[in-house]
């Protein structure tokens, strides 16, 4: 009898303690799922797509989210890739790059209850959050650094495509260079391609033969060809989007970092923390740590030049210096 009473007592205690049947926590029951349609070159661009992928990989490892991705070479169109990610049940679907906008908006209209993020362009659709960056501010600092470094007073800018977004890089770079030296010359060439390192190398060689000694490319994998050619000819270069020093360690003095990895990690963290997805446009500049310069290597800046760069960063952050965005 005592054994039966003791058994019954233990069962009651266990029930009160919740040990009769293990219950899954809300986090265990449903993990956040994020899908991303990468930009045209996709993984291996050593720039924008790789940085975005790294940010979501970190969120997976540290926050426990699930994520999937599509590349244009597999889905054939952005629309197909984005719709596949929607059908997989992702909580948020991201379109990476301005070229994705038209197809993302087609799918967003078809699935009005689905949440989307568009990176590098602005959508007015209610279910699309737009994330943009102040590339003009970061490029201003890159231009100032290039002007402080140049001996020939000739700089080169290589853009991936002649579009409004890349104009922000070009115009900021020119303005920063001319802030340091009003007489400096900046040659600009648009490659029309973000995925051709050989074309980037060809453009860089022509610029170098014309006397350019510091080159800045906003051109994805095409820009990698620029960096490596600068190294080949013992010239200097400035990388873009991510810290590209390791692609040409004798040439890359810094990189204009566009912190898409940090931005997407924060999106994931907000979702995991049940803070939701901000609506409308999110604009990230120097003030928000959305962009900035990677560590300066290869060259040695004087204390005076470093102070100049630090001062410019503060003035850009506070909008005391306003950059030119459009041509």
Image: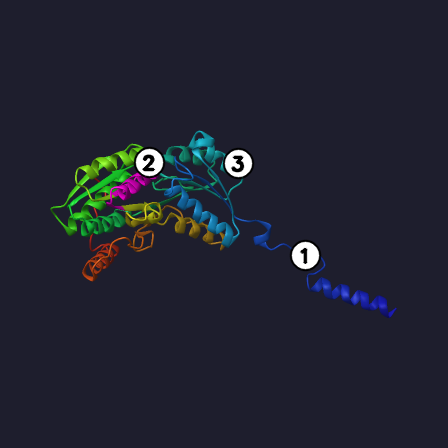
Farthest residue in the top direction? 76
The picture places residue 210, in percent across and down from the top left corner, at 17, 37
Could you say which disc has been placed on residue 197 in the image? 2
Q: Alpha-carbon distance for marks 2 and 3? A: 35 Å
Could you say which disc has been placed on residue 218 in the image? none
Q: Nearer the viewer, residue 79 or 50?
A: 50
Element under disc 1? loop
Element under disc 2? helix
State which mark lies toward you, 2 or 3. Answer: 2
Image quadrant where one finds the N terminus? bottom right
Could you say which disc has been placed on residue 87 in the image? 3
The picture places residue 67, in percent across and down from the top left corner, at 50, 44
Crowding at dot 1, Cα within 10 Å, few <14 / some 14-19 / many 20+, comes out as: few
Q: Which of 59 and 128 is in front in this view?
A: 59
Crowding at dot 3, Cα within 10 Å, few <14 / some 14-19 / many 20+, comes out as: few
The residue at which mark 1 appears reads as 22
Q: Alpha-carbon distance for marks 1 and 2? A: 56 Å
Element under disc 3? helix
Image quadrant where one finds the C terminus? top left
Q: Is residue 163 magenta?
A: no
Marks 2 & 3, CB-CB < 8 Å contact:
no
- Magenta stretch bounds: 216-237
Residue found 72% across the figure and 63% down from its top: 14
């Amino acid at each position: 009898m005592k054994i039966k009473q003791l058994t019954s007592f233990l069962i009651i205690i266990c029930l009160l303690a919740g040990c009769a049947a293990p219950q899954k926590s809300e986090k265990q029951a449903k993990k956040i799922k994020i899908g991303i349609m990468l930009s045209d070159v996709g993984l291996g661009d050593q720039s924008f797509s790789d940085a975005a992928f790294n940010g979501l990989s970190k969120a997976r490892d540290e926050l426990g989210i699930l994520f999937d991705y599509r590349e244009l070479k597999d889905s054939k169109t952005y629309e197909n890739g984005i719709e596949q990610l929607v059908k997989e049940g992702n909580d948020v679907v991201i379109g990476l790059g301005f070229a994705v906008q038209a197809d993302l908006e087609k799918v967003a209209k078809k699935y009005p209850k689905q949440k989307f993020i568009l990176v590098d362009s602005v959508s007015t659709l209610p279910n699309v959050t737009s994330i943009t960056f102040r590339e003009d501010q970061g490029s201003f600092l890159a231009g100032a650094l290039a002007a402080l470094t140049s001996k020939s007073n000739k700089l080169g800018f290589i853009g991936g495509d002649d579009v409004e977004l890349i104009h922000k890089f070009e115009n900021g770079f020119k303005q920063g260079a001319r802030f340091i030296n009003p007489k400096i010359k900046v040659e600009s060439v648009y490659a029309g391609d973000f995925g051709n390192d050989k074309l980037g190398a060809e453009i860089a060689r022509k610029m170098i033969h014309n006397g350019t000694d510091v080159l800045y490319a906003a051109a994805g994998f095409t820009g990698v060809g620029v960096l490596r050619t600068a190294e080949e000819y013992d010239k200097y270069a400035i990388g873009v989007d991510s810290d590209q020093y390791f692609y040409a360690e004798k040439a890359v003095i810094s990189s204009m970092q566009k912190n898409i990895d940090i931005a997407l990690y924060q999106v994931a963290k907000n979702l995991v923390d049940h803070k939701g997805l901000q609506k409308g446009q999110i604009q990230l500049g120097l003030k928000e740590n959305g962009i900035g310069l990677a560590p300066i290597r290869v060259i040695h800046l004087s204390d005076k030049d470093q102070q100049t760069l630090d001062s410019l960063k503060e003035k850009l952050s506070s909008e005391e210096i306003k950059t030119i965005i459009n041509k």
